[in-house]
Image (cartoon, helix red, strand yellow):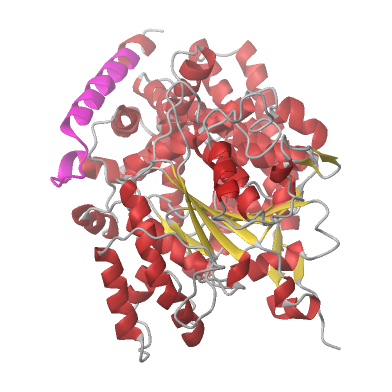
Amino acid sequence: MKSTRLHSSAVHRRAWPNRIFAVLYFAAVVTLIRRQILSLLNSTIPIPISLLIFLADIILSFIWVAGQGFKIRPIRRNTHQENLTLIIQEHEFPAIDLFICTADPDKEPPLSVVNTVLSVMSYDYPPEKLSVYVSDDGGSQFTLMAFTEAVNFAAYWLPYCRRNQIIERCPSVYLESNPVWVPEFDEIKELYETMKNRIEKVLIENIKDKDITGRGMPNLIYVSREKRKNIPHNFKAGALNVLVRVSAVMTNAPIILTLDCDMYSNDPQTPRRALCYFVDSSLKDNLGYIQFPQAFFGINRDDVYGSEFKFEAKIYPSGNDGIGGPTYLGTGAFFNRRSLFGGPQTFLVPEIQELSPYWVVNKSIGSPDVLALANQLARCDYEAQTLWGSKVGYRYGSVAEDMYTSYLMQCEGWRSIFCHPRRPAFLGNSAMSLFDLLSQVKRWCVGFLQMGFSKHSPITFGIRFLNPFLAFAYIYHAFCPILGIAVTIYAFIPQLAMIGSISIFPKVSDPWFFLYMFLFLGAYVQDFVVFMLEGWENNSIIKWWNNQRMWIIKGLSCYPFAITDFVITNCLGITAPRFNVTGKVVDEELSDRYNRGMMEFGVESPVFIPIATSAMVNLVALACGVGEVAIIGNERFKDLFGQMFIAGYGVVNSWPIYEAMVIRHDPGKMPTKITLVSLFVTLILSSASYYYLRNV
């Protein structure tokens, strides 16, 4: 008898090796901390150095323990959407409201956003059950006009995709991919080029507008909310909540898909995959959302910036799936609308009945009453004295609204699912500039710290309501920016101590030396194995190496800068955090350098100073260590091996930085001002260490 199951899952084979390794590694960590505490009481090393190394090891240990939540029970899932119509007929499919947010037409070109919209409008799903809502926080007339012109093209594009069974339904990507030629190809290409060059103002509603075959098209609704300087607009979370309210009075679909404007649909079957979980009676009562992985196109061969975010977007969510569900990644998630209104057992009744997830819409989208109410719900002062942003909708209080929202939803009792099909459901732009990537990560980190030090901190609040391992996972996310303290300490202190001729690690001949090596190599080998096994067919050792290098670079730059920003804005209250949109406009010369695997600096930003300074300090320290060993002999090598190893490791990782400072002359090289400032800081630190530590 043919199976009618809609989905299946299995625990990853790496679960048990992870658990065994965790026990061994934890024992080693406890042993190291105990040894360091005893050493502090009877140390020949200067106390400031001992305390800093101890602090770094405590932080690394804390984050490592929290990170075990991801590794204890990782799950791999599969959907069987071919069985969907055996359980539910197409005319019974639930409606879906699709939310796409854009904020700056200069950084997010309207044509790119239009391509994202067209890719989801052409889903393999009943078009009358799809409604696409576009939030334009930039209020750009050009964006509005670009969308309205896209409507004409959609009337041809949707039937073209259906007739020819096109899988790649983002028009720009499809037309650039040298597809198999079909009789209509030339016509559709000409229509696309026309759309790029013409702008007309037209809005559509599927009960009136048809494609060229006479079939209805999905609703397309443009929303630009009211914003005033004296009223907080709460960034993306605020925009999403406006869409929740506006869509409630227009279509009120039980399922909501949120999507970034630069992340187009790569698989027309994606809604059906999500439906495999939403229609499962054993899941739907407490299923809050289904998260698909973030995946990116245009990444260079060796992924020089670690832009794939393999751990954050694939490995960690898979690990969370086995202990309660993945976090919301900010895009590519199908939400149960009901989950935005309190917990599974504690429904929060909205202020007006039209906003209830159970409200049945009985008026046309274009009716005067509906439009008038929608305008009222999009006002900037509507949320005053309501639960929006605190207990209803997407949550405020962190610029990482995605993680904060999913965290609070899971504390309320909702679970989530990570759906990871072989073909990526969505593909987005990757950063080609190191500054852009570090700025983006810094913004996330500020949001994580806001969550970690809020009244709903995972340490004090989440641990009471979540699976303990899931709470650990959120603790890891919330406090991972403090890794910047540990990384900065290990990037400078052992090296400066070596310049000052002070040995701070056990000799090679000391049994304790092997404990340090096990902790270092054990963590790196596990990281390497997990990285290589996830999507192994597209992996390489160089990709892994670049990924671990970026971990160090982030630890030296965006992590400590995020801590500083958090302290200034949230603790001292000097300024409010600003949301900076990451640019999606591509410069041809920049693109060429990126595709050749070159790191792009180019900007005179202080975020590069600790990176460049660390590279110089490690080089100076290694030279000092080698010189001292050459003069004194083999016994000194045994004393300094640990520090020479760390400095050498830093030097090898810093090659692209040396190249950018000394060898390169293109616009993406390290700015001369940054190089000179870093050189000055290196001279000060090295001189002070040499003269002070040698006289202690």
Q: Main secondary structure of the magenta part?
A: helix
Quadrant (top left, top right, bottom left, bottom right) of the N terminus:
bottom right
Instruction: Estimate the x, y position of residue 121 in percent, counting from the top left.
Output: 51, 67
Residue 265 falls within the magenta-colored stretch:
no
Q: Residue, x 67% and y 42% (percent of image)?
A: 406
Instruction: Estimate the x, y position of residue 297 in percent, counting from the top left.
Output: 41, 62
Instruction: Estimate the x, y position of residue 192 in percent, counting from the top left.
Output: 31, 72
Q: Is residue 600 above or below residue 361?
A: above
Q: Residue, x 72% and y 41% (percent of image)?
A: 409
Q: Observer-nearest residue: 378 or 404?
A: 378
| Residue 82 seen in the current view | yes
Q: Is residue 223 above or below residue 253?
A: above
Say whether residue 517 is left or right of residue 441.
right
Instruction: Estimate the x, y position of residue 474 in percent, counting from the top left.
Output: 67, 38
Part of the protein shown in magenta: 661-689
| Number of marks in the rendered image | 0
Quadrant (top left, top right, bottom left, bottom right) of the C terminus:
top left
Say whether residue 499 is left or right of residue 132.
left
Q: Residue furthest left?
A: 665
The image quarter containing residue 582 is top left
Say whether residue 141 is left or right of residue 287.
left
Q: Observer-nearest residue: 379 or 337?
A: 379
Q: Is residue 694 above or below residue 369?
A: above
Q: Residue furthest bottom?
A: 183
